Amino acid sequence: MRVKAVIFDFSGTLFRCEDTRSWLRGALAEAGIDAPDAEITGYAERLRVSGGQPGGHADFAVPEHLTSLWRRRDLTAADHRAAYTALIRLAGLPWPGLDEILYDRHRLPQAWRRYPDTLAVLEVLAEHGIPVAVLSNIGWDLRPVFEYHGMAHLVASYVLSFEVGMQKPDPRIFRLACDLLGEDPRDVLMVGDNLVADGGATEIGCSFRAVGHLAVSERPRALLDAVRHLRWETRWPPPPQQAWMEPMRPDLNLDLGTDLRLRTLGIDDAALVTEATSRETKPALWGPRPAGAYSPHDAQAALLAWDPAAGGQFSIGILRGQQLLGAIGLMPDQPGSAELAYWIRPEQRGRGIASQAVQATTPWAHRTLAIPRIWLEIRPGNEPSLRVAQRAGYRFEQRLPQHCRDWSADDAEHDSWHDCLIWSHESSGSDGSDGSDQPRP
């Protein structure tokens, strides 16, 4: 497929709104209202059914008295607010004035979660000189969301329905996006989660790829898959690859000076992952599911989702000979910053392996990937992980209340959440190095 530019939808495509319970909990906290978990869960479900959360599910019935407002909701900021606050009120919340607080909360950048491959797909397109536009039926300015998540520099143009007085699937709004990108519609790909609204781009000659409107945890690679088979036809040479992405290929091989070594894991290592997790009863590095041993299919799917060639998250194996003892994961969250996570197979825990691996990986990532900030997410009370952080020179940064999911339920809206401690390690050199010449064993 020939392509010279790509248009992305926003909600349900590049980003997903926080789950309904988190949305309600945050609004109650802002209003200074305490409510028991059971009450929050019950009213969150009523909000979901009413359709009051912008960006939430679309499978609900709009009352007849709101149909006219609903049809034009994305054409002005006032109608957008009026439509959604009316739907919120249908949920019968017992807290006066919370409809306005809920509406304002959904516009906060922090209320939006990017899909696992959002950054990766935008970076891949940028590397090939493919300009990107974001086209959304919306009633507020979403640009701060991209700024907050460190991706504004990867978007060339924004076309927002409330600003231009048109909404998808009107052909005129797609043509406007193509004009802003400076491309013929026949050379433009539209990617979105709505077959009718986003698929309307085909009326002017754009190609179209659909992605599922799913939870962030359920859609690891749909965006990368949507552009995987494109034939790049750039008008200018691709920009230099960012230094922190250059080594994301399976040729890392660090000798820790003991009998351990680190190397990047790829799809061919599925058998190692299957064997290493055979005694596991909890989630491993690569995701919350499965919570236990990996089948060969599970291992292949996990390593595909952590494919270093995609330019996003990737995993590094901790090996003794040909046995996988554990793994380190690096997950870029924005330019210059990446989360580090690790997992050790059950029978090898408590032997200092995690400390050795984190102490070696951290300066390597600073120096070789030129990532100035690397951070850990630790559950309060997890003393072994706190010791690993301290030994590796990480410093406590902040405590995020109710930020991390427990994964006791598949549905995020019915799951429990806990506080997280953020510990970070900053490079000391201006070039991203940590000031050392070798990884610390």
Image (cartoon, helix red, strand yellow):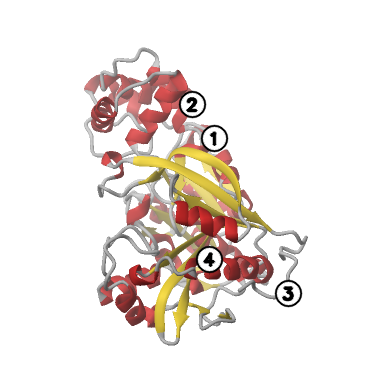
Q: Depth-wise, is mark 2 or mark 3 nearer the camera?
A: 3
Q: Which residue is mark 1?
A: 141
Residue at 59% across, 71% down? 360
Query: Is the residue under label 2 in contact with that under label 4 (CB below 8 Å)?
Result: no
Could you tell whether 426 is left or right of 62 in the image? right
Q: Give the residue pinned by disc 4.
A: 355
Q: Residues within 10 Å of mark 2 (few under 14, many from 20)?
A: some
Quadrant location of the N terminus in the rendered image: bottom left
Quarter of the image where the C terminus is located: bottom right
Could you tell me residue 396's position as x and y percent?
59, 46
Numbered disc in front, either 4 or 2: 4
Q: How many marks on residues?
A: 4
Q: Earlier in the sequence, mark 1 or mark 4?
A: 1
Q: Secondary structure at mark 1?
A: loop
Question: Mark 3 falls on what kind of element?
Answer: loop
Give the residue at x 26% y 40%.
414
Mark 2 = which residue?
77
Dot 1 amino acid type: Asp
Quarter of the image where one finds residue 295: bottom left
Residue on which disc 3 sits: 437
For image coordinates 54% across by 33% down, the residue present is: 163
Could you tell whether 229 is left or right of 234 in the image? Answer: left
Q: Are marks 2 and 3 in contact (CB under 8 Å)?
A: no
